[in-house]
């Protein structure tokens, strides 16, 4: 039984945050008292399993009356209950100007120093809510991890979002909004293809 308890305790480590303010009474003592591992496992289950507040209060209060056999019986029942779900952390909110959307942009860091950037904003999955910035160099995408550098790029793009999007298309020959090749003179001159111009309302 002790080996099983040790394994179960390892499984629940990190699963239980505990319920603030819950204090268990001292366990029963004597030759028939539950083992320390039994008591620890019982407490983890009572604090971590789904049950009503009344049930939890009762199980906390009577814990000091259980001998080894009674605690084993209660543990066998408690392990069948589902764990209380952990709260899901909200996606990280980044200070990105709301006008900047996913796409490719060209900006001058200083006069004569033209650079190209890609903004990615996943809509689902574990990265939903994040904004990723990469500098483009030929076929290479270089992730920008320095916050100050990212904020500088956001600020430069935000000065003229549409202009930066157009400049990318004019210089590279591909639409900064959808990345498709610009094949007609009007699109090459404007820097954005006809479908994306309509989608962007320009």
Image (cartoon, helix red, strand yellow):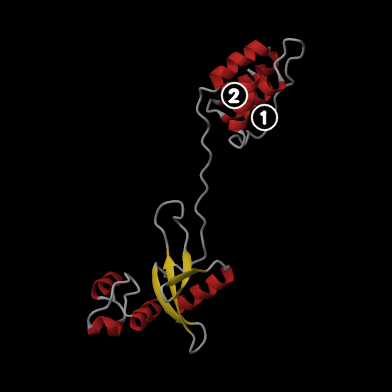
**Image quarter of the N terminus:** top right
In the structure shown, which secondary structural element does the residue marked by tag 2 occupy? helix
Q: Is residue 173 above or below residue 200?
A: below
Question: Which residue occupies the foreground of this view, 99 or 85?
Answer: 85
The outermost residue toward the left is: 184
194 left or right, relative to 21: left
Q: Position of residue 13 (x, y in %)?
A: 62, 34
Q: Residue at x 55, y 21 (%)?
A: 78
Residue 88 vertical placement versus 69 (above, below): below
In this view, the residue farthest toward the bottom is 112
Neighbour tally class for label 1: few under 14, some 14-19, many 20 plus, Cα within 10 Å = few
Place of residue 161 in the rendered image (x, y in percent of width and height, measured from the top left): 41, 76
Expressed as whole percent of the image width and height from the top left, the position of residue 193 reads 26, 76
Q: Quadrant of the C terminus?
A: bottom left
Q: Name which residue lies at 61% across and 27% down.
A: 7
* Quadrant of the rendered image containing residue 116: bottom left
Secondary structure at badge 1 equals loop
Q: Which residue is mark 2?
A: 56
């Amino acid at each position: 039984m002790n080996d099983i308890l040790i394994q179960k305790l390892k499984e629940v480590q990190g699963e239980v945050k505990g319920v603030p303010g819950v204090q268990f009474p001292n366990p029963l003592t004597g030759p028939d008292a539950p083992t320390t591992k039994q008591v620890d496992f019982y407490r983890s289950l009572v604090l971590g399993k789904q049950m009503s507040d009344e049930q939890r209060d009762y199980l906390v209060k009577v814990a000091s009356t259980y001998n080894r056999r009674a605690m084993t019986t209660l543990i066998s029942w408690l392990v069948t209950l589902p764990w209380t779900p952990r709260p899901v952390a909200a996606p990280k909110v980044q200070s990105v100007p709301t006008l900047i959307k996913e796409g490719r942009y060209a900006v001058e860091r200083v006069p004569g120093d033209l650079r190209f950037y890609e903004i990615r904003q996943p809509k689902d999955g574990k990265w939903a809510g994040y904004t990723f910035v990469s500098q483009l160099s030929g076929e290479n995408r270089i992730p920008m991890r320095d916050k100050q550098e990212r904020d500088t790029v956001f600020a430069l793009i935000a000065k003229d979002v549409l202009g930066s999007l157009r400049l990318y298309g004019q210089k590279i020959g591909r639409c900064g909004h959808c990345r498709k090749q610009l094949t007609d003179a009007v699109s090459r001159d404007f820097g954005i293809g006809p479908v994306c111009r309509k989608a962007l309302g320009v």
